[in-house]
Image (tube, helix red, strand yellow):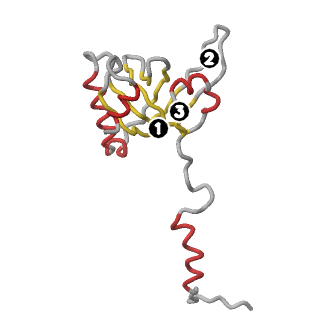
């Protein structure tokens, strides 16, 4: 017959061996990969290299009745925002971003590249091309996080200047 010890104590060193990996997050796969920092043109030109990855990129926001995109004057990618959640509502950077977009619109129509943003998100892209050379499916960034945003019109700011203003 095997005895079961109901009130056994582990030596302190053994207890740490059991608990420490869970407290420090050292289990395999517990850390998320950092996002790949890239340009909009790289995303456009090599969508298969970034498909399914977390990315960080920057550009000017364009919105109108049918579009929500990030553009740098040479390349653009469609955006998909997060659903309205308590977490998003509590995030000051999201609230600032949404306020900037709302106030930059010409009437109720478009934002006309007034707001510059650095975003992180998941990239969905396809390298499949139509016979005319255009992409068969549009690439999309699903925004996870707004790193920064600022009013810096594309007509009067370089990307470097706008990004510098963004992080101030």
Which numbered disc flags the more N-terminal residue, 3 or 2? Answer: 3
Secondary structure beneath disc 1?
strand
At 28% from the left and 20% from the top, the residue drawn is 105
Cα–Cα gap, marks 3 and 2: 22 Å
SS of the residue at dot 2?
loop
Q: Which residue is mark 2?
A: 136
Mark 2 neighbour class, 10 Å CA radius: few under 14, some 14 to 19, many 20 or more: some
The quarter of the picture where the C terminus appears is top left
| Number of disc labels | 3
Q: Position of residue 50 (x, y in %)?
A: 60, 33
Please give the name of the residue rendered at 42% of the width and 23% of the height, measured from the top-left corner.
Answer: 68
- For the residue carrying disc 3, how many other residues have a C-alpha within 10 Å: few (<14), some (14-19), or many (20+)? few
- The residue wearing badge 3 is 38
Which residue is tagged 1? 120
Between marks 3 and 2 in the image, the one whose residue lies nearer the viewer: 3
Q: Is residue 46 left or right of residue 56?
A: right
Task: Judge left or right: residue 8 versus residue 109.
Answer: right
Q: Nearer the viewer, residue 113 or 94?
A: 113
Q: Judge by depth and name the residue closer to the eye, 121 or 57.
A: 57
CA separation in Å, label 3 and label 1? 10 Å
Which residue is drawn at the image coordinates 55% and 71% (left, top)? 20
Q: Are marks 3 and 2 in contact (CB under 8 Å)?
A: no
Specify which label sits upstream in the sequence, 3 or 1.
3
Quadrant in which residue 47 is drawn? top right
Which of label 3 and label 1 is nearer to you?
A: 3
């Amino acid at each position: 017959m095997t005895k079961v010890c109901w009130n056994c104590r582990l030596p302190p060193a053994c207890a740490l061996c059991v608990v420490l990996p869970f407290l420090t997050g050292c289990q395999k796969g517990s850390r998320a990969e950092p996002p790949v920092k890239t340009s909009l043109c790289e995303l456009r030109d090599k969508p298969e290299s970034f498909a399914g990855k977390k990315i960080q990129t920057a550009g000017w926001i364009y919105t109108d009745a049918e579009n929500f995109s990030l553009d740098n004057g040479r390349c653009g990618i469609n955006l998909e925002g997060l659903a309205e959640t308590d977490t998003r509502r509590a995030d000051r950077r999201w609230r600032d971003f949404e306020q900037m977009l709302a106030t930059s619109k010409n009437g109720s129509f478009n934002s006309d590249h007034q707001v510059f943003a650095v975003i992180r998100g998941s990239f969905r892209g396809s390298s499949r091309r139509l016979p005319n050379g255009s992409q068969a499916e549009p690439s999309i960034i699903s925004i996870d996080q707004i790193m920064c945003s600022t009013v810096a019109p594309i007509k009067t700011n370089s990307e470097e200047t706008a990004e510098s203003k963004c992080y101030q």
